[in-house]
């Protein structure tokens, strides 16, 4: 065997495209299968780029215990349309092969399930009708189908769920997405620096801070833009406030679904206090505008720090009281305990990330394994629970919230004690290193958000790729509801709280 | 094991610290100073500055003849302010919903917005003043406007006090609220849902993405033809719109 099969990078480190090993497909196949046999490794992203005369396929594998990302690639001359599918040997690639199939019509031989991921516009401008999704069909006198969506009962995003049930019991759930598809990746390349950063915030508006950190650090790496350490801390404060607010909101939603009104109402009010603090800081309750490449329009200041501290003290304590009550209340527990279980084996199989992984023994957390921003200086220990059910996903939010609150307090103190230079203004007019590739990963509240980019000879953005953690985790929901009562679906769904728009981009 | 009695005491403590979260006067709330609401354009703005902010704006929100800022397109990034801090300011005025699309354009020197009551169809106030049930449709919304609409009914804002409420079935409602720039993939579902609402019915566009298409106007994955077919009764700008912007807008619409 000649040469290396991969290049190793750290989070957000830019490399020359030519330094990424180009393997022939059989080598690529064997390497990826071997690498992903290790439970602490998983595929961050595997996708295809159109380079004119050839298609280039790049695969990024996170090696958590080594704190590095391994990147390798293979290619196909234009016109060739078929590859041996890796999915039968390594199931977590199923969604990536499906996406490549959808966008480039590559047929993966042996893939069990080459169905659309988001019925997106293909590069040639054509698209599949979203309603043409080929659901699993069955012939039976005993079973029946339940279809839900795309528009759901509450105020939530659209997606279609198709259940195959035996009586009240769910045997199979298939999730058809794509209703939120906006063609964001194509827009990225056409637009300017400011437009891109705003676009990032609207990939999933509920994760605006996480997304814009992923984008900012990617651009800063490719454009060699240094930022002060104080700004890294500020970003982490924003990120943890976002996490805390959403975790409280999710706790409220879980209570709603099991008709525990006190839990619902108290948490609603608590979430308000946190997002109002973000608004106090930057003028937007979701933190839109807070994070910008190269600098900030809203540098942290003493008044904001005081506000954050006061609110966290009050709301943090009240949240703990409330959560203690929720997770000791028999009527709530009987609806959470043992419901919607995802096993560790399933989580490894599908490459689950974020909360879905950590609630079932898998300690995947980018804050520890591939630290970014101030987490490079801060030893974060992930919360890991074992039972993989709705209760675990609820409790995980509780435990993580406590950590976020104490971290924000700690970050505020470190920030105060720091010698601070002036925070630079944001940079939108940047030149990027030519012919380079970089991948940036952030542990946002749902899980790892992954942004990657490729530049051309002139240092312009040639390709941009976004992966929401939900891309991995929608399969977790589909597996978790098997053999459950269909009436438990809402609470299972809330306990994952996956992103439709993040998946559909 | 915790005894039942202890649990009850805990619940009483939670209730006490929860206190009174309901905002009594939804029309008189003062939002934090940095909230990005109604913009003001100074009448000292120069042609060069106008050129400059036009070049910066990521969504072409500035209009000419006469110069103005279109809040229906604006995604409230405030970058024009950072470029010309003395000439374009964002106030924390959240009462920025309008019954006419044109009213969302803020002209040079304009310091307030008046809701045009004459543009409201009389049937709306006749039938919906005491009770307005709405069906929300997220059509490629980024989930922030959706969360703010949920918040409009929560314990703080509680718009249910006015009989305004979101329901599940379009057949039980008086109109739809659209969020998001409307994707091609949601175009059919939107039409079907709208058709299922009984007449007379209203349409509200919530958030700048829905009103102006936001960052997505040029994407082939967007299909906004639905909006060409119908009269829009209320435009609620914001990215996302604040719950108070939404509630006050709807209250103006139904004449409360
Ligand atoms: S705040 Fe509005 S008008 Fe100003 S630059 Fe941003 S989008 Fe354009």
Image (tube, rainbow, N blue to C red):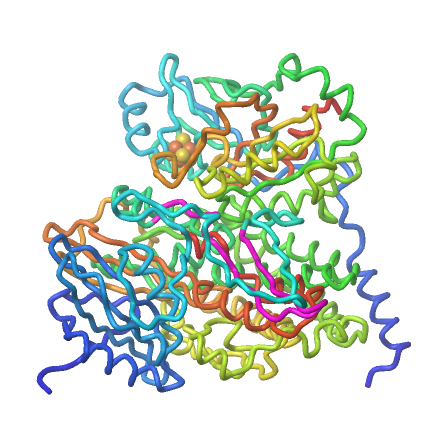
Residue at image coords 83%, 60%:
B16
Residue at image coords 42%, 39%:
B77
Residue at image coords 82%, 61%:
B15
Which of the image's four quarters has the N terminus of chain A?
bottom left
Is residue A76 found left or right of A12 in the rendered image?
A: left
Query: Does the magenta portion include A208?
Result: no
In this view, B242 is above or below A66: above
> In terms of depth relative to the viewer, which is nearer, A25 or B111?
A25
Count of marks placed on residues: 0
The picture places residue A227, in percent across and down from the top left corner, at 30, 59
The picture places residue B57, in percent across and down from the top left corner, at 34, 33
The picture places residue A425, in percent across and down from the top left corner, at 32, 47
> In terms of depth relative to the viewer, which is nearer, B90 or B212?
B212
Q: Quadrant of residue B218?
A: top left
Query: Does the magenta portion include A173?
Result: yes
In this view, A18 is above or below B32: below
The picture places residue A192, in percent across and down from the top left corner, at 27, 42
- The answer, for residue A293, to whether it is visible in the render is yes
> In terms of depth relative to the viewer, which is nearer, B211 or A38?
A38
In this view, B155 is above or below A47: above
Q: Quadrant of ligand 1?
A: top left
Is residue B4 found left or right of B100 in the rendered image?
A: right
Which region shows up in magenta?
A: A159-184
- The answer, for residue B85, to whether it is visible in the render is no
Residue at image coords 59%, 79%:
A388
Q: Quadrant of residue B48?
A: top left
> In terms of depth relative to the viewer, which is nearer, A245 or A120?
A120
Is residue B48 found left or right of B137 in the rendered image?
A: left
């Amino acid at each position: 065997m000649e040469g290396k099969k991969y290049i190793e990078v750290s989070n957000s480190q830019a490399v020359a495209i030519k330094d990424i090993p180009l393997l022939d497909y059989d080598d690529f196949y064997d390497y990826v299968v071997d690498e992903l046999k290790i439970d602490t490794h998983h595929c961050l992203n595997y996708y295809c780029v159109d380079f004119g005369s050839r298609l280039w396929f790049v695969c990024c594998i996170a090696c958590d215990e080594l704190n590095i990302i391994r990147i390798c690639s293979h290619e196909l001359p234009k016109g060739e349309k078929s590859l041996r599918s890796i999915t039968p040997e390594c199931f977590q690639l199923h969604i990536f092969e499906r996406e490549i199939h959808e966008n480039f019509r590559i047929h993966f031989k042996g893939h069990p399930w080459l169905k659309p991921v988001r019925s997106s516009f293909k590069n040639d401008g054509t698209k599949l009708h979203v309603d043409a999704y080929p659901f699993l069909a069955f012939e039976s006198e005993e079973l029946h189908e339940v279809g839900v969506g795309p528009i759901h009962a509450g105020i939530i995003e659209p997606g279609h769920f198709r259940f195959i049930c035996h009586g009240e019991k769910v045997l199979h759930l298939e999730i058809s997405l794509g209703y939120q598809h906006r063609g964001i990746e194509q827009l990225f390349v056409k637009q300017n620096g400011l437009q891109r950063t705003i676009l990032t915030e609207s990939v999933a508006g509920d994760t605006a801070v996480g997304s814009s950190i992923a984008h900012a650090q990617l651009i800063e790496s490719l454009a060699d833009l240094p930022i002060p350490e104080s700004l890294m801390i500020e970003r982490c404060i924003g990120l943890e406030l976002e996490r805390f607010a959403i975790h409280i909101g999710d706790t409220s939603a879980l209570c709603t679904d099991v008709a525990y009104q006190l839990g619902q109402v108290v948490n609603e009010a608590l979430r308000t206090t946190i997002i109002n603090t973000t608004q106090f800081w930057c003028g937007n309750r979701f933190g839109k505008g807070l994070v910008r490449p190269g600098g900030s329009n809203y540098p942290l200041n003493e008044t904001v720090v005081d506000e954050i501290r006061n609110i966290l003290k009050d709301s943090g304590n009240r949240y703990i009281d409330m959560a203690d009550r929720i997770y000791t209340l028999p009527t709530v527990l009987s609806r959470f305990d043992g419901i919607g279980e995802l096993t560790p084996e399933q989580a490894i199989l599908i490459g689950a990330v974020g909360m879905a992984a950590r609630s079932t023994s898998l300690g995947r957390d980018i804050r520890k394994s591939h630290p970014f921003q101030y987490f490079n200086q801060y030893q974060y220990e992930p919360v890991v629970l074992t039972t993989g059910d709705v209760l675990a996903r609820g409790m995980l939010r509780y435990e993580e919230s406590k950590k976020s609150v104490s971290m924000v307090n700690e970050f505020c103190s470190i920030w105060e004690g720091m010698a601070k230079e002036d925070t630079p203004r944001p940079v939108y007019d940047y030149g990027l290193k030519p012919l380079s590739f970089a991948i940036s990963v952030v542990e946002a509240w749902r899980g790892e958000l992954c942004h990657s980019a490729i530049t051309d000879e002139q240092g312009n953005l040639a390709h941009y790729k976004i992966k929401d953690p939900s891309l991995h985790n929608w399969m977790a929901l589909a597996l978790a509801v098997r053999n459950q009562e269909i009436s438990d679906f809402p609470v299972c769904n809330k306990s994952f709280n996956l992103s439709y728009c993040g998946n559909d981009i | 094991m915790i005894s039942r009695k202890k649990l009850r005491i805990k619940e009483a403590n939670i209730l006490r610290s929860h206190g009174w979260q309901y905002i009594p006067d939804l029309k008189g709330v003062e939002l934090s100073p940095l909230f990005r609401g109604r913009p003001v354009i100074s009448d000292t703005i120069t042609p060069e500055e106008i050129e400059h902010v036009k070049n910066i704006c990521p969504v072409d929100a500035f209009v000419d003849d006469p110069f103005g800022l279109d809040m229906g397109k604006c995604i409230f990034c405030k970058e024009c302010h950072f470029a010309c801090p003395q000439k374009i300011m964002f106030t924390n005025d959240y009462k920025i919903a309008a019954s006419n699309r044109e009213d969302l354009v803020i002209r040079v020197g304009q310091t307030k917005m008046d809701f045009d009551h004459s543009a409201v169809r009389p049937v709306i106030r006749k039938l919906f003043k005491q009770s307005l049930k709405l069906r929300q449709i997220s059509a490629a919304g980024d989930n922030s406007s959706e969360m703010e609409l949920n918040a409009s009914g929560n314990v703080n804002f509680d718009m249910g006090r006015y009989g305004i409420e979101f329901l599940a079935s379009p057949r039980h409602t008086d109109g739809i609220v659209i969020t998001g720039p409307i994707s091609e993939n949601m175009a059919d579902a939107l039409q079907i849902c709208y058709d299922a609402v009984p007449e007379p019915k209203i349409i509200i566009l919530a958030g700048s993405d829905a009103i102006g298409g936001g960052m997505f106007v040029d994407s082939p994955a967007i299909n906004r033809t639905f909006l060409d077919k119908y009269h829009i009764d209320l435009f609620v700008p914001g990215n996302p719109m604040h719950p108070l912007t939404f509630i006050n807008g709807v209250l103006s619409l139904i004449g409360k």
